[in-house]
Amino acid sequence: MKAIAKIASPTGQWPESVHPITKGGCMGDGQHVWAAGEWVMMLRNCFVREEGSRLILCSGIPRAWLEKKTTMSFGPAPTAFGDIDITIKFEANKPVVEWRGKWFSSQPEIEVRLAKI
């Protein structure tokens, strides 16, 4: 994630392809919109992803983010079950994950997989 963020343009975009040695854009559009879309999807998946009939929360949150002990939030994010808002806050220096959903029907099974710090 850090390596990819470092090669983003000043406008937060990436070329279609990046040369592995020079790290410069080497083909396609210089401001390729689908790459930015993939970045947004990657961030979403850090906070929430579907796995069968359940939601997995926070499985992709980097430890470096947690070590800062700063409140983070994401959402509302659409899922197959409805929209969800997720907050990670710290109580007594330990992370606490809270969520609020606007479900299409009932709340799905939810599993929190936050990395230990």
Image (cartoon, rainbow, N blue to C red):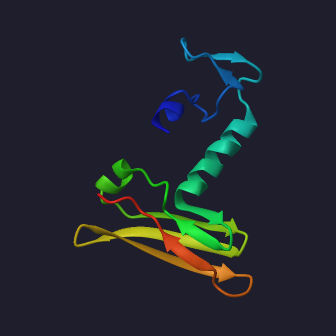
**Rendered image quadrant of residue 107:** bottom right
**Where does residue 98 sit, x and y in percent of width and height?**
46, 76
- The residue lying toward the viewer, choosing from 10 and 97, is 97
The residue sitting at the left extreme is: 92
**Rendered image quadrant of residue 80:** bottom right
**Where does residue 82 sit, x and y in percent of width and height?**
70, 75
63 relative to 58, above or below: above
**Where does residue 110 sit, x and y in percent of width and height?**
55, 76
For the point 55% across and 17% down, which residue is it? Answer: 23
For the point 57% across and 51% down, which residue is it? Answer: 43
The residue sitting at the right extreme is: 28
80 relative to 46, above or below: below
In this picture, residue 5 sits left or right of residue 11: left
84 relative to 35, above or below: below
For the point 73% across and 31% down, which residue is it? Answer: 32
For the point 60% across and 48% down, which residue is it? Answer: 42
Total numbered labels placed on residues in the image = 0
The residue sitting at the front extreme is: 52
In this picture, residue 37 sits left or right of residue 75: right
Pick the quarter of the image with the C terminus.
bottom left
- The residue lying toward the viewer, choosing from 54 and 83, is 54
